[in-house]
């Protein structure tokens, strides 16, 4: 296995496109393209606040996380039927396959839908059916992670978990998303403890806009296995050491961070710094329909802006497999595919 191939910078874009990779931080509702939003709105008779696709796209000028979330929840309002959830996830899987994503762990926000009267079964069945078809027809392995909305109460998270329990075999874990600042991980200590007892995988958004303290409590109070975003961790050297020592993966989303003004320019992004500190960082798209790109857009633009090389590319792909919630045999298979692609570029 050659982890440090001598590959010329000119061939780096093609290598980034072709290498197999896992996506571990994608909100499936954030993959809803404006065209599909309008198609579903028409199909379901939902009235939107924008006259058309272009007007909606023009509204995608965000200043921070909250300015995005307001539009993201409005976009999700067109999802009503099982087929809508299926169509959304299927469109994502087709794009993922084109980017050589071999495995994806999809976040979904049930509370966004159940609050509008959509049944939990409708949401989970539609998404799960798309995962099954993606495996069979595209060769993309997919699984679901249920996210609690952190701007809501812990009692509401408990009620959501209860509602989802009849479908326990259709999701592999739980996460925590939505407005971060003012809603620290410890607000959800009880429900995460219950999810841990249930044998669910645990992740949480922390250190996207919020302070390193939120990353610490996600680790030590919620006992999460991965941190989503986590880019603010560089402000705390002790935290950086902890993440590296315990090999806690960070699911980093460079174009999201750019669009939500977490970094002023992609050139300022700290992904290379995280990797060079020995942290198991990965690249992900977060909400690709809103942030200007899917997996390969994130890889290509970030590499062009930050001067990372083929060694970083290999590390990021290998990290995505290490950080995924699959068995060792699957990880081994994907690492072998990764080595094969790198070997073909030497
Ligand atoms: O980037 C995000 N952060 C927090 N919540 C979210 N929900 C969708 N995307 C995001
Ligand atoms: Zn996210």
Image (spheres, rainbow, N blue to C red):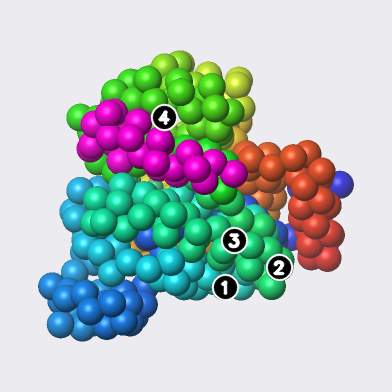
Q: Pick whichever, 181 or 43, lies toward us.
A: 43
**Above or below: residue 81 compared with residue 119:** below
Q: Earlier in the sequence, mark 4 or mark 3?
A: 3
Q: Pick whichever, 128 or 94, lies toward us.
A: 128
Determine whether label 1 and label 2 are within 8 Å by CB.
Answer: no
Secondary structure state at the residue bearing disc 3: helix
Q: Pick whichever, 26 or 29, lies toward us.
A: 29
Query: Which residue in the protein does label 3 denote?
Result: 131
Position of the C terminus, as image quadrant, is bottom right
Which numbered dot is residue 136?
2
Determine whether label 4 and label 3 are within 8 Å by CB.
Answer: no
Q: Which residue occupies 41% across, 29% down?
A: 234
Q: Position of residue 140 (x, y in %)?
A: 66, 63
Q: Earlier in the sequence, mark 1 or mark 2?
A: 1
Query: Which residue in the protein does label 4 denote?
Result: 234
Does the rendering let one see residue 10? no
Q: Is residue 204 left or right of residue 309?
A: left
Q: Which residue occupies 64% across, 40% down?
A: 325
Q: Which residue occupies 21% across, 62% down?
A: 74
Query: Which residue in the protein does label 1 denote?
Result: 94
Q: Position of residue 175 (x, y in %)?
A: 43, 38
State how far apart marks 2 and 4 are (Cα). Answer: 41 Å
Q: Pick whichever, 31 or 244, lies toward us.
A: 31
> What secondary structure characterizes most of the magenta part?
helix
Q: Residues within 10 Å of mark 4 (few under 14, many from 20)?
A: some
- Locate residue 338: give its quadrant: bottom right
| Numbered range of the magenta stretch | 146-169
Q: Earlier in the sequence, mark 1 or mark 4?
A: 1
State how far apart marks 3 and 1 are (Cα). Answer: 11 Å
Residue furthest front in the image? 166
């Amino acid at each position: 296995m050659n982890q440090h191939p001598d590959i010329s910078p000119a061939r780096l874009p093609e290598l980034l496109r072709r290498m197999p990779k896992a996506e571990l931080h994608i909100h499936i509702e954030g993959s809803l393209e404006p065209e599909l939003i309008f198609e579903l709105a028409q199909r379901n008779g939902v009235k939107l606040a924008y006259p058309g696709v272009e007007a909606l796209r023009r509204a995608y000028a965000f200043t921070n996380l909250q300015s995005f979330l307001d539009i993201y929840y409005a976009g999700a309002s067109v999802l009503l039927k099982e087929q809508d959830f299926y169509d959304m996830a299927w469109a994502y899987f087709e794009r993922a396959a084109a980017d050589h994503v071999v495995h994806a762990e999809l976040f979904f926000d049930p509370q966004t839908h159940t609050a509008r009267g959509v049944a939990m079964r409708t949401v989970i069945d539609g998404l799960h059916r798309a995962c099954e078809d993606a495996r069979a027809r595209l060769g993309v392995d997919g699984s679901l992670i249920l996210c609690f909305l952190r701007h809501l109460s812990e009692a509401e998270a408990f009620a959501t978990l209860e509602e989802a329990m009849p479908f326990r075999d259709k999701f592999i874990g739980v996460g925590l998303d939505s407005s971060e600042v003012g809603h620290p991980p410890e607000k959800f200590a009880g429900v995460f403890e219950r999810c841990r007892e249930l044998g669910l995988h645990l992740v949480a958004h922390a250190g996207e806009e919020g302070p390193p303290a939120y990353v610490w409590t996600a680790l030590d109070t919620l006992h999460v296995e991965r941190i989503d975003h986590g880019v603010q961790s560089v402000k705390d050297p002790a935290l950086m050491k902890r993440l590296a020592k315990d090999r806690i993966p960070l699911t980093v989303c460079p174009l999201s961070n750019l669009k939500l003004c977490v970094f002023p320019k992609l050139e300022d992004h700290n992904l290379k710094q995280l990797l060079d500190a020995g942290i198991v960082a990965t690249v992900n798209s977060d909400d690709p329909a809103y942030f200007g790109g899917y997996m390969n857009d994130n890889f290509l633009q970030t590499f062009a802006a930050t001067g990372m090389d083929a060694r970083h590319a290999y590390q990021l792909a290998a990290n995505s497999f290490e950080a995924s919630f699959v068995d060792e045999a699957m990880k081994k298979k994907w690492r072998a595919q990764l080595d094969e692609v790198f070997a073909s570029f030497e």
